[in-house]
Amino acid sequence: MSTPGDYSAVRKDIASLLHQPGYDDGSAGPVLVRLAWHSSGTYDYETDTGGSNGAGMRYEAEGGDPANAGLQHARVFLEPVKAKHTWITYADLWTLGGIVAIQEMGGPEIEWKGGRTDYVDDSKLPPRGRLPDGAQGADHIRFIFYRMGFSDPMIVCLSGAHTLGRCHSDRSGFHGAWVNNPTRFSNTYFRLMLTRNWKEKVLDNGVRQFVYYDEDAEEELMMLPTDMALLSDPSFRPWVELYAKDKERFFADFAKVFSKLVELGIERDEAGKVTNADNFRGGYHSAPKKSGRPGLPEEVDRYGEAEPLRQENNQFRARL
């Protein structure tokens, strides 16, 4: 166990678990980025609710949101880190996991500050429906991201995270990777969006996406309707074009906007200490490590893991 506040030790242990030969493309990195994204992206600027404080995904009300399907794997990957560094909150661990993963996959160094607390119950969880729906268009994208306080350039920049990972038909309904090397952070997502002929395809499950078959790699790549909306919208497209030709600019802007993302809902004083009401009243409250006792098929435990999910996760726990 490390000394409380030794985030550098936590960073090293997160980096050491990214290599997962049996998971997706051999890396836990992309799903850790998605975990950081979804644990922060519930923020509502007007009501000041949601965001990265609290680690609400520990509870079924948030963890069981269909938009968070598959993120149980990311949370399981990080459990050994939590077991070793029991002092760290899940809220800090999940956001830091995404930050470390991006850098380890060749992305920019992103500013991150600790201090988030874990909610003691599920009474303050945000309502479902605040995360993006990939089947929608530009109006939906703006509705989701404006609510968090992001501008059009920031929306396009954050969408660049789709250079990592892939979709799964049993989770989001979509299927495939956006780029050929989905474990390497780059601006390839933007370049492919502009230079390939994307054709509409309806999957067997009825979900509509756009695809391009790369004959050299013998692989079908995909784009979501929300991705293609970045091309058709006159305000979004110039930023797609900029990031496609200027990797350094994309990296610099992404570092700023992702740091803003994981700070959503966090208030700090001049010294950087979190001053949110839950933190002020309860201090740095670290929830206990997830229970090792599985739930029953028809119910979940307080951390959102039922027996079927436990069985699915066993193959990943065995390697950690």
Image (cartoon, rainbow, N blue to C red):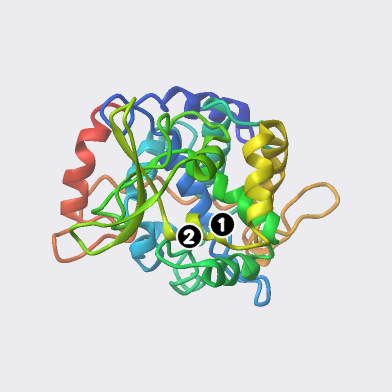
The residue under the point 63% across, 54% down is 237
The residue under the point 16% across, 45% down is 311
The quarter in which the C terminus is drawn is: top left
Badge 1 marks a residue whose secondary structure is: helix
* Residue type beneath disc 1: Leu
Left/right placement of residue 177 relative to residue 316 reads right
Residue 149 in sight here: yes
Give x and y (percent) for residue 235. 68, 61
State the residue in front, 101 or 121: 101
- Give the CA separation, mark 1 to mark 2: 7 Å
State the residue in front, 31 or 116: 31
Verify CB contact (< 8 Å) between mark 1 and mark 2. Answer: yes
Give x and y (percent) for residue 224. 41, 55
Give x and y (percent) for residue 93. 52, 42
Q: Which residue is most to the bottom?
A: 47
State the residue in front, 69 or 319: 69
Question: Is 79 rendered above or below residue 260?
Answer: above
Q: Which residue is most to the left?
A: 297
Q: Which mark is residue 226?
A: 2
Question: Is 99 rendered above or below residue 12?
Answer: below
Q: What residue does disc 1 label?
A: 230
Badge 2 marks a residue whose secondary structure is: helix
The residue under the point 42% across, 29% down is 181
Residue 112 in sight here: no
* Residue type beneath disc 2: Thr
Label 2: few (<14), some (14–19) or many (≥20) C-alpha neighbours in 10 Å: many
Give x and y (percent) for residue 137. 49, 67
Q: Which mark is residue 219?
A: none
Question: Is 26 rendered above or below residue 261?
Answer: above
Q: Which residue is most to the right?
A: 270
Label 1: few (<14), some (14–19) or many (≥20) C-alpha neighbours in 10 Å: many
